[in-house]
Image (cartoon, rainbow, N blue to C red):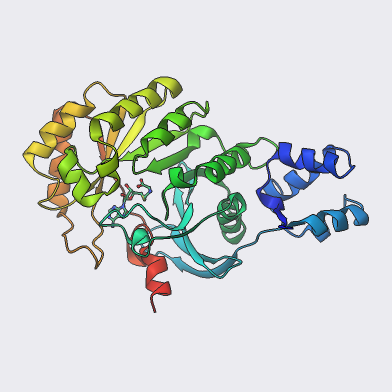
């Protein structure tokens, strides 16, 4: 029999489990709080539970733990990047960022990714496997323990496509948000997707006011398909329709991520079409200057070009920001650090 991942269970699941094994449901709450509020993993030290109950729980479940494999601290800002080692020895990457308005964790949702975006390091070896809810939670809890800081914002922008690991990601969101646990506000959670349309509709119906961030990267189907294989499956007009549906269902402002690539998606035609499709949308464009990787031989635009692109969007009444680069000295975005370690 496969053992259950105890620290990836929701409060209701833990309560139901206790009833199943002939215990009172409040025992489930004790276990949930122990993991998710007290930031403990050693079930043998949960002494409020009788010893025989601890044994019963250990017989049918396991506690999934991560080890810190390496930590890199930025010297230019208060950012640390972590490589975590999983039970099966896979390595994942997470980032801890300190801002004035609170601490943010950027976490991975999969080991690798199967979306194949040309400029993204995470996808170069395909998908290895999905992360479990506990593996996502532990990225946050381990960084809190290590830094002694509280994390109040979570962005699902590390390796992986969150909507390709839908059930586990939803479970993660529900657990991290639970008021008996860490209690992170849903408004402080951002999910970034390359645009898997059916899943955007599904997410719209979950009644979760999280921020949706959609990787657009080009307003033209043919150009987008050259850099993002998902665009061959779903076209931009259907994607925008799904985003509008999300906006109406959740009343949340969306973000469109736009990785700016010199001479690829930074032309006047791109600007015009981008402003046309986003007109009247409660959204903003987050411009990410390309972080070049060796498998994609395109250039990062110079600072002036990035700024100009932003100004041109603003002139067209499209709110636009430039992604602040954090920890630029400790390896760049999305899977680049992990790959530099795993590819020895
Ligand atoms: N799978 C999710 C999360 C990806 S990471 C998604 O596609 O949205 C978050 C953002 O960083 C995405 O917009 C992604 O396209 C972008 N990104 C990935 N690698 C990059 C690179 N080398 N340079 C700039 N942006 C990159």
Q: Locate residue 10: give its quadrant.
A: top right
> Height in image: 176 above or below 319?
below
Q: Locate residue 67: give its quadrant.
A: bottom right
Position of residue 318 measured from the top left corner of the image (x, y, whole percent)? 21, 29
> Height in image: 209 above or below 165?
above
Position of residue 243 measured from the top left corner of the image (x, y, whole percent)? 34, 29
| Quarter of the C terminus within the rendering | bottom left
Q: In the image as oriented, which residue stretches furthest toward the front?
A: 1
Q: In the image as oriented, which residue stretches furthest toward the left?
A: 268
| Quarter of the N terminus within the rendering | bottom right
Answer yes or no: is residue 50 visible: yes
Q: Residue at x 20, y 44 (%)?
A: 224
Answer yes or no: is residue 156 visible: no
- The residue closer to the viewer here, 281 or 306, is 281
Q: Locate residue 45: give its quadrant.
A: bottom right
Task: Describe residue 54's horizontal placement relative to residue 148 as left or right.
Answer: right
Position of residue 76 measured from the top left corner of the image (x, y, whole percent)? 36, 61
Q: Residue at x 30, y 32 (%)?
A: 239
- The residue closer to the viewer here, 325 or 223, is 223
Q: Residue at x 60, y 58 (%)?
A: 142
Task: Describe residue 3's horizontal placement relative to residue 293 as left or right.
Answer: right
> Height in image: 324 above or below 142?
above
């Amino acid at each position: 029999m496969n053992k259950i991942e105890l620290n990836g269970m929701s409060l209701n699941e833990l309560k139901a489990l206790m009833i199943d094994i002939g215990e009172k449901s409040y025992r489930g709450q004790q276990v949930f709080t122990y993991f998710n509020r007290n930031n403990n993993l050693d079930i043998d030290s949960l002494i409020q539970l009788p010893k025989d109950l601890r044994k019963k729980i250990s017989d049918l479940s396991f506690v999934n733990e991560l080890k810190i494999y390496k930590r890199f601290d930025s010297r230019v800002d208060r950012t640390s990047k972590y490589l975590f080692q999983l039970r099966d020895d896979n390595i994942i990457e997470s980032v801890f960022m300190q801002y004035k308005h609170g601490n943010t964790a950027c976490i991975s949702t999969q080991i690798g990714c199967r979306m194949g975006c040309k400029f993204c390091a995470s996808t170069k070896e395909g998908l290895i496997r999905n992360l479990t809810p506990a593996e996502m939670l532990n990225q946050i809890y381990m960084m809190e323990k290590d830094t002694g800081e509280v994390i109040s914002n979570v962005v699902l922008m590390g390796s992986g496509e969150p909507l390709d690991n839908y059930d586990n990601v939803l479970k993660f969101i529900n657990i991290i948000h639970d008021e008996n646990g860490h209690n992170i506000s849903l408004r402080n959670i951002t999910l970034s997707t390359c645009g898997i349309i059916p899943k955007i509709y599904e997410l719209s119906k979950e009644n979760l006011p999280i921020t949706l961030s959609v990787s657009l990267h080009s307003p033209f189907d043919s150009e987008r398909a050259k850099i993002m294989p998902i665009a061959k499956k779903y076209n931009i007009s259907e994607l925008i329709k799904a985003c509008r549906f999300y906006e109406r269902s959740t009343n949340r402002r969306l973000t469109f991520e736009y990785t700016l690539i010199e001479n690829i998606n930074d032309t006047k035609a791109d600007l015009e079409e981008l402003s046309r499709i986003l007109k009247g949308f409660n959204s903003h464009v987050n411009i990410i200057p390309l972080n070049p990787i060796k498998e994609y031989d395109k250039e990062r635009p110079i600072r002036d070009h990035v700024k100009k692109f932003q100004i041109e969007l603003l002139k067209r009444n499209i709110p636009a920001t430039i992604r602040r680069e954090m920890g630029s000295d400790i390896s760049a975005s999305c899977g680049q650090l992990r790959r530099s370690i795993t590819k020895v």
